[in-house]
Image (cartoon, rainbow, N blue to C red):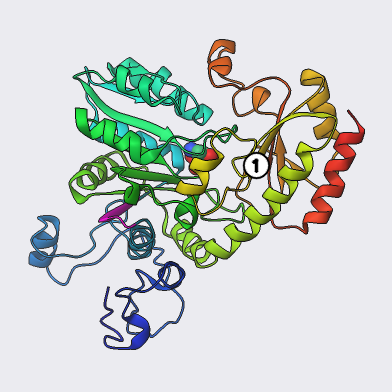
Amino acid sequence: MTQEWDAGRLDSDLEGVAFDTLAVRAGQRRTPEGEHGEAMFLTSSYVFRTAADAAARFAGEVPGNVYSRYTNPTVRTFEERIAALEGAEQAVATASGMSAILAIAMSLCSAGDHVLVSRSVFGSTISLFEKYLKRFGVEVDYPALSDLASWEAAIKPNTKLLFVESPSNPLAELVDIAALAEIAHAKGPLLVVDNCFCTPALQQPLKLGADIVMHSATKFIDGQGRTMGGVVAGRSEHMKEVVGFLRTAGPTLSPFNAWMFLKGLETLRIRMQAHCASALELAQWLEGQPGVERVYYAGLPSHPQHELARRQQSAFGAVVSFEVKGGKEAAWRFIDATRMISITTNLGDTKTTIAHPATTSHGRLSPQERANAGISDSLVRLAVGLEDVADIKADLERGLAAL
Ligand SMILES: *Cc1c(COP(=O)(O)O)cnc(C)c1O
């Protein structure tokens, strides 16, 4: 990670530095202009010194950029910074979180292969496997996230991938990642973890034994609700396949978005700390409210996997879901009574958001799929932002009063 421009300077020597330092500095290579911030390379292609140079670069005989669908220096800086934060050999950026999942599946699975996807994953993730990958001959089964025995029993000789989100969206269910990695590796498949809700600031799945980690960078990595992107990280042998698919199919990350994510990463840990502190306070408070049936937050001792969460994560995340008494009508009344909190399904934003999963993010699932995922009609999902927690609480009190 030395930089040609200022090689030897203390601030470019990142061997052995801490997470927060990597989040601010990893991956940057200064141009001869001496810019302090990361340069944004808004260019679709690159020029060659000579025809022979072009031929050598296209043939991969000499390193260098050819075309921004293949490589872009700003995107590379983002990829190297994520690789440093996740402890990965290599990271590859994508146009969105969904295209990160698509790239993993398309590059590592073929017709006739079998994958296991946790029941408790993002709605579009289920749709991607169920509606599209199945059409191309990939078999899919859906074990219950936390039930290790059901994962073990579901692995077949042709199982290529195990795909999980921990904690899950929106119910904050966990799986013991180290234990699941052991089960996977005893039988052959790779373990993929969608680390969107924790970010590497709270949980580093590769260090727990997972093979591949991916993110929707749209969420906490940007952190300010501005832009879409994704990233996949892991061993080079697997990332080579992912890169091959992305270069050919095209859902690569734009340099502008990569630049925004670099700025987001610089404040990632302190933002996550603030999100988590407010979320814990609100979860504890909601749990004591008579109109609230149940709160789903791994930071609460009442959460069945509280001990695992303490062991596996350094904090409990920003998403607090809860069931209100009175079904869908009550959930909608609660949501509609808030005035400051944004009614939107996005999360990982400075602005607190509230949503009704059954009719939005999980609305396209069949009632059976929704039931399998544990999404009831009375469930409300809160993604806690960075406003003063007293103001968020005051707005939620309006919701409670409307029940
Ligand atoms: C949002 C999200 C995705 C999809 O990411 P996009 O950037 O919206 O494509 C995948 N997984 C999780 C957990 C998410 O929250």
Closer to us: 106 or 315: 315
Q: Where is the N terminus found, in terms of image quarters?
A: bottom left
Residue located 28% across and 79% down the image: 3
Figure check: 237 above or below 337? below
Q: In this view, does 235 lie above or below 164?
A: below
Residue at the outermost right position: 401
- The image quadrant that residue 143 belongs to is top left
Residue 251 point in image, percent of width and height: 37, 42
Magenta-drawn stretch contains 91: yes
Q: Position of residue 166 (x, y in %)?
A: 47, 38
Does residue 176 lie above or below 112 as drawn?
Answer: below
Graded by Cα atoms within 10 Å as few (under 14), some (14 to 19) or many (20 or more), the crowding at tag 1 reads: some
Q: In which quarter of the image is residue 378?
A: top right
Q: Which amino acid does label 1 sit on?
A: Leu
For disc 1, the marked residue is: 300
**Where, quadrant-wise, is the C terminus in this rendering?**
top right
> Residue lying farthest top?
368
Q: Is residue 7 left or right of residue 325?
A: left
The residue under the point 53% across, 61% down is 268
Q: Is residue 58 in the magenta section? A: no
> What percent of the width, then of the height, locates residue 4?
25, 81
In this image, 247 relative to 312: left or right? left
Q: Which residue is drawn at 45% across and 51% down?
A: 203
Which stretch appears magenta? 87-92
Could you tell me if residue 267 is visible in this image?
yes
Depth order, front residue of 310/24:
310
Does the beta carbon at disc 1 come under 8 Å from ligand 1?
Answer: no
| Residue 52 position within the rendered picture, expressed as x and y whole percent measured from the top left | 7, 65
Give the secondary structure at mark 1.
Answer: loop
